[in-house]
Amino acid sequence: MFFASDNWAGAHPKIAERLHASAAGFSRAYGDGDLDQAVYARFSEIFEREVAVFFVATGTAANSLALAAYNRPGGISFGHRESHIIEDECGAPEYFTGGSRLHAIDGALGRMDVRTLERAVDRFAPEFVHAGRPMAISMTQSTEVGTVYGLDEIKAISAIARQYSLPLHMDGARFANALVSLDTTPAEMTWKRGVDIVSFGGTKNGCWCAEAVVLFDLDRAKEMAFLRKRAAQLFSKSRFISAQFDAYFDGGLWLDTARHANEMTAELAATIASSPVARLAWQPQANEVFAVIKTDVAKKALAAGAAFYDWHAPAGFDGQLGEDETLYRFVTSFATTADEIGRFGELLRS
Amino acid sequence: MFFASDNWAGAHPKIAERLHASAAGFSRAYGDGDLDQAVYARFSEIFEREVAVFFVATGTAANSLALAAYNRPGGISFGHRESHIIEDECGAPEYFTGGSRLHAIDGALGRMDVRTLERAVDRFAPEFVHAGRPMAISMTQSTEVGTVYGLDEIKAISAIARQYSLPLHMDGARFANALVSLDTTPAEMTWKRGVDIVSFGGTKNGCWCAEAVVLFDLDRAKEMAFLRKRAAQLFSKSRFISAQFDAYFDGGLWLDTARHANEMTAELAATIASSPVARLAWQPQANEVFAVIKTDVAKKALAAGAAFYDWHAPAGFDGQLGEDETLYRFVTSFATTADEIGRFGELLRS
Amino acid sequence: MFFASDNWAGAHPKIAERLHASAAGFSRAYGDGDLDQAVYARFSEIFEREVAVFFVATGTAANSLALAAYNRPGGISFGHRESHIIEDECGAPEYFTGGSRLHAIDGALGRMDVRTLERAVDRFAPEFVHAGRPMAISMTQSTEVGTVYGLDEIKAISAIARQYSLPLHMDGARFANALVSLDTTPAEMTWKRGVDIVSFGGTKNGCWCAEAVVLFDLDRAKEMAFLRKRAAQLFSKSRFISAQFDAYFDGGLWLDTARHANEMTAELAATIASSPVARLAWQPQANEVFAVIKTDVAKKALAAGAAFYDWHAPAGFDGQLGEDETLYRFVTSFATTADEIGRFGELLRS
Amino acid sequence: MFFASDNWAGAHPKIAERLHASAAGFSRAYGDGDLDQAVYARFSEIFEREVAVFFVATGTAANSLALAAYNRPGGISFGHRESHIIEDECGAPEYFTGGSRLHAIDGALGRMDVRTLERAVDRFAPEFVHAGRPMAISMTQSTEVGTVYGLDEIKAISAIARQYSLPLHMDGARFANALVSLDTTPAEMTWKRGVDIVSFGGTKNGCWCAEAVVLFDLDRAKEMAFLRKRAAQLFSKSRFISAQFDAYFDGGLWLDTARHANEMTAELAATIASSPVARLAWQPQANEVFAVIKTDVAKKALAAGAAFYDWHAPAGFDGQLGEDETLYRFVTSFATTADEIGRFGELLRS
């Protein structure tokens, strides 16, 4: 019953196996090996256009370098108030950019409100030396609270980006979960809707450590090579990332694992919704369930070995928390089993 | 005949196996899992005192964060002119420290000359606001050109560090190779000789990706936690690093792999020394051979599939290069075989 | 009728005169001259304890270096949402600190709400590596909207700073105006109420360019010397700053000029309050008046040569703006005359 | 007998007078006033083409921002080993650029050796992600040791800059002294010889504080506005800088003061050359004399009130220092008098 985070799981057997199988032999280092090249090409296929791919160590690195690629003095990037870049990265985006600012945009359930975003950006246009100036818009797909921007919403946000000549960054730490949720393609969810740069995460969806910055603007690739190396994010034996992505994409494994995670979330949600001591805080759209549960019941479940975190109520949560209730987050992954959910359901019933 | 770099090899079978075996199950993320804790404890055993261990993605990250741990405005760090921090990290140490400076110290064959170092540090003492001020001394063990500081040399350098109240950093990307070469212990080669912080590398010696900053000053551990996270170097599924180190240390595997690499270097050196078309540029002490070879012979070997790089002559190389000769670097690793060396010897003879 | 800003004025005649008189002769550079030393001593007298004084070029530099003096990885500083460090410095504080964050605190009429501040700081305690951690609290005295924190409010804010072991910074770009408004002493308004570091501004109050960082914690002075030089803020002929401050303090000139500016504001406020086409937006407490004026009347005044800016409504402004009304800011200074105000009053009446 | 530095002098009477005369009245702030605009236009006249001018507080700021204008990840700038940016700015250029590197170029008597420069730059071409890459070339005119690059030398250096597509920066802290020494025009000494950006110093030549970045590439002006503000170098009452430059340029005052300083240096040099206890270390070309003097004689002169510093021997100084001799630096300025030199000559004779 490990619902604490999708990074508590290890690696999917097929990915672990591929990595194991890649251990022998010699290969050029620093991203220039044959397998590396093949995986880059695979990314281009998946995105249906030529892309530039840069492996990095963490999602935080991908996000921070993506913003650094568009860095400018006095720059201000706009993201959701509860986004990972603002809440969970210890200031890495600001640090990587030498002090650019993140401007928090409100919006219900993890999604930036488009009108609020537009007003915020507009406040800094035209550029004024005292106030600083817009630099980028960053959106998270799926969001920190398990919701998903619809394709039209992405389009609406990129329209603002275009209007103010800003790049649009997508934090895709849970890219696959959103993709499966929307039943769409990588191309449709990104550059065809105006996204310029993607933090493409594989770690939460079955890899050990497989994160990449994907650029659609190939002209920026050369700079990114220097940005990444300078940020100490250039792996020597990059083959170990490539091997993971190789298996990840093979036969659509990544979509299968994401689909599984989302289905487990749906099942867990149904279990919770049917409980007399719990209710869904809002409807899950990817691989995270947020639920209001009687605190004593939850504590018993935790004591019984279930793992999940209590959570602060996000903007847009319109439920009331009773005095004896708490809001909790549950995350499912490729490794979550129906059995675990069944056992958790029993704990809720007992 | 892959002598291009020790990072062209993959992972040692035992390490690959352990990683594979660790893929299942759930574990706390961000370095707080049971295996993580066990590996940290193992580091303390190996160093014979309590140490603080921080896994990072690359040797560049370890070096840069080690210097960042001692960062100060106007700071100047001293390292060998041909050291990795100066020659091969795209300015990462300067970037991580917001602009501190690396001051190049000359010295023969990769080792800082102690007197030159002392004079250089002394020039900035007492502190003077215009000139900047000393911040750290960094030494590489084994060095970029395959030599090793003797224990007395480490002591002599740390004496300068103490005299000027500076921390002494050891870039141990090839820590194990030096250790085996000196037939000493981690404790004797580091804190017992005055080293304060170590970049502990496992990648070149048989891991996929296993680098750590090891601090002997535990008071700095809390700051390092923030420095590392802010630098986007905190792995979520850190278990994948721990599993590698776990196998790395198990039964002294790391010493075996280093010993093997050094022995292969000795064998390769003997092969070269006995060749009429090649000679050793200087005596190897770890896992790198530098040799002067007839250029046309070397080109044929490269064409025949051998991999190695030509190299710029370092300070202290007193040989003369004939017009038809070139200086080359050969690196051996856990994966190098006597057979490869034998085949290369044949190429030299043919 | 130049009410656009207190930095549209030049220099007070006595300050201009003193500077002129100081032009001849030689003096040690970089802040070590006799006059420099005398002025530092004068600062200590004025603050009734030994202080460390660092001249800098701008108020932005003073603020940014004050925060840099307490910089830490992942650091978050708290200031009012409409404060100068957040709204008007192009990211300089973040830049000087290599990416620390400014966290906006709401509060009516330019003053942080103490409870809101406490909750915001508390959210980051205890320290958590993902979220970052508190670094400093910064308050502006007098505020950006012409209000003043009372001595008890300063005490309440410093109590929060103490509780969370944070330094308290005071942005005193209009220090003298607040001092005169509260009819108190520099010591009472700062360290006796728990302030640790002050941006002490002279420019807006009659100097050409005279800003200083004043530290009560002398242990930090040595670091500040390096921080300032590294930030390119160490004047060579620092005598030209000292000469200004020398005249500024002489005979209490600085209090006279501030008192005059505040009185002019009171007079302007009375003029506006008595007008049928204008009203005070809130009660001024220092040298700034914010007024709601019929837009067409204001435009005529501007056309007639008056200079003042329209302003965005700050939090806590509870007035309603009619469709034909606009909120404007008026700033008075040592150079404002009753005659100017009289002429402006006539414009309002006509 | 104040020969310690040209920044020990105050302000030229005409400049002090103009500043005094500018104190009254109101003017737009932040560089947008009428006088500011007039002075910018004056710069364009002086340089015989349209230039963008940015006032800053210090020469260190001008140099650091000039390099920041051409900043790039992994960037390496080349300057003379004894240049101000390397020896005397506490790492400000590295700090302003977030960690770019300064690469020291050797050369006799303060001037980079052109062949050495070319080899150094060439080592980093073509670009290689590990090594970093060239970013700018910086030359100092006149140099730190009182010599001057000839127009052909500037041309030769800019040819290297062009060859490698690098900008050429001129640190003109003593711009006027070099100009007068070469008897040429600002245009001839800069953009007509391939200089792209100039740190234009007025402080050492008779101003209180008047430094500017001058850009010939107007496209970079917008970015510089943000760079400067973010670096806390945007003066509010910028009129006080404009007033100084206004008088500085008026009637060619700046050339007169520089000529006077150079003449005083020539006179001092003659005095020294004719002394039995002193000799010129090398031939002065601007406003600095370096001399070898019997140490006991120099000490007596210092005790008698003369001010000058002992100096480290620069590369290219081929004289031998006797055991009883020391190398000293003497700087003359607009404020130096023949009488002072006469008195110093007497001290040498006595």
Image: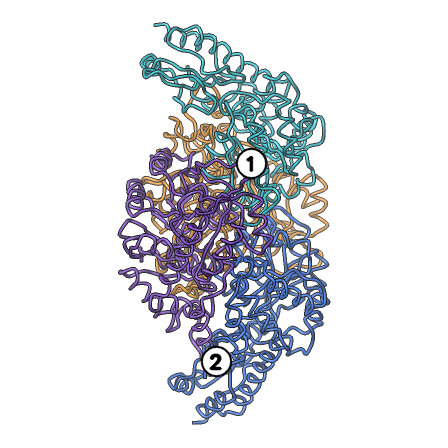
Chain colours: A purple, B blue, C cyan, D orange
* Residue at left offset 70%, top offset 69%: B187
Are the residues under badges 2 and 1 in a single subunit?
no
Q: Is residue D332 above or below residue B62?
A: above
* Quadrant of the rendered image containing residue D25: top left
Q: Is residue B141 above or below residue D81?
A: below
Q: Position of residue A127 (x, y in %)?
A: 36, 36
Amino acid at circle 2: Phe
* Quadrant of the rendered image containing residue A121: top left
Mark 2 — residue?
B3
Amino acid at circle 1: Glu
* Quadrant of the rendered image containing residue D339: top right
Q: Position of residue D202 (x, y in %)?
A: 48, 37
Whether residue D273 is visible, yes or no, is no
The quarter of the picture where the N terminus of chain C appears is top left
Q: Which mark is residue A323?
A: 1
| Farthest front residue in view | A350
Q: Residues within 10 Å of mark 1 (few under 14, many from 20)?
A: few
Q: Is residue B265 above or below residue A86?
A: below
Q: What is the total number of numbered labels drawn onto the structure image?
A: 2
Q: Which chain is home to disc 1?
A: A
In depth, the one of D65 and D108 nearer the eye is: D65
* Residue at left offset 53%, top offset 92%: B274
Q: Position of residue A12 (x, y in %)?
A: 45, 66
Q: Position of residue A126 (x, y in %)?
A: 33, 34
Q: Tell me: A33 left or right of C81.
A: left
Element type at marker 2? loop
In depth, the one of C307 and D256 nearer the eye is: C307
Q: Which chain is home to disc 2?
A: B
| Farthest bottom residue in view | B350
